[in-house]
Structures are given as structure tokens and as C-alpha cells.
Amino acid sequence: MHFKKLALATAAVLSMGGASAANFDWGPLDTFEFGSAFYVGGPGSFSDTFQFTIGTNTLVSLAAVDNQGGARNIIDGMLSVSGPSPFPGFSFDNTSVDAQAWLAPGAYTITISGKFGAAGQYAVNSEVLAVPEPETYALMLAGLVAIGYMARRRKV
């Protein structure tokens, strides 16, 4: 698995309360991208963005997870995506959530926002999902035909 720009996309953001924002550029979307942030000194709020581009129609899965009830829980977390194709945004509060959609070529921005108490931590990742090639379907169909032929031959 290729973790391109992992050091760039992983952030430790220290905040003394108030509002915080961080921006990350993933560049062209790889098979797997990861980003996270950690906030302390709350209560406070945050709004972080992750930018990426896609060159061809691509099936993409996005997931967000917070500390799930621990001392660094995100409150009212929200993930939204803006770009050429619609992507279902979702909220995450003491949970892990994911969604997937076909995205057209172009530039996209993921915005993650929410609040935290004394501290907050979240992680977000994107994954390009594999789509079977036509040859895969042809091979599967040939296998089913062969099995059907063998089953018919045994009956006769």
C-alpha cells in the first residue's frame, strides 16, 4: 500500500481553544490517502480541508473516524466534499462512518469540521476502489458455461 505524502497529510495541530483550521494537498489521488489531526487546549472548533484531483472517472470511498468516546472525542463532526461530482457528506460523532461514490475528473475538496472538549482527534482516509475489467467478467462467464456444460453432461 502506497502512503504518498503521509507525513504531509498527518498533522498535529495544537490549539489553545477558539477556532483552528489546517489545509492539506494530497495532489493526484492515489490508491490510499490518509490524514489526521489532534487538537488540545479546548474547548474549541476546527475546520480542516484536504484537496485532491482525479484524472478519470473513479470509484472513491471516504471514511472518517473520531476517538470514539475517549478523552479526545469529536463533537458534531461533519465531512463534506465539493467538486465536479456530488458526494454524500456525512456526520460523525463518537463513531466511524464511510461513504462511496463515482467521481468525475476534476479537483475536489474534503472539508472536515466539528468541535472538541479538552482535546479532539480524528482521522480521514480515501481509497480508490477496484472495478473489475471486462476480461474479468468474460473469464467468469466462461467458467459458468464450463460448469453448466459439465453438469448437463453428467445428467445425460
Image (spheres, helix red, strand yellow):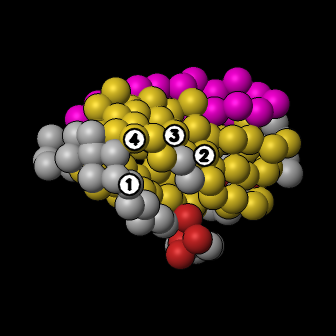
Q: Residues within 10 Å of mark 4 (few under 14, many from 20)?
A: few
Which residue occupies the foreground of this view, 128 or 94? 94
Q: Is residue 23 above or below residue 7?
A: above
Report the span colored magenta.
Answer: 81-102
Between disc 1 and disc 3, whose residue precedes?
Answer: 1
Q: Is residue 118 above or below residue 29?
A: above
Number of the front mark, 2 or 1: 1
Give coordinates of residue 75: x percent, y percent: 29, 32
Between disc 2 and disc 1, whose residue precedes?
Answer: 1
Residue that numbered label 3 is attached to: 47
Residue that numbered label 2 is attached to: 49
Is residue 128 highlighted in magenta? Answer: no
Residue that numbered label 1 is attached to: 15
Gap between marks 2 and 3 measured at Cα: 7 Å
- In terms of image quadrants, where is residue 44? top left
Q: Do labels 2 and 4 touch, CB within 8 Å?
A: no
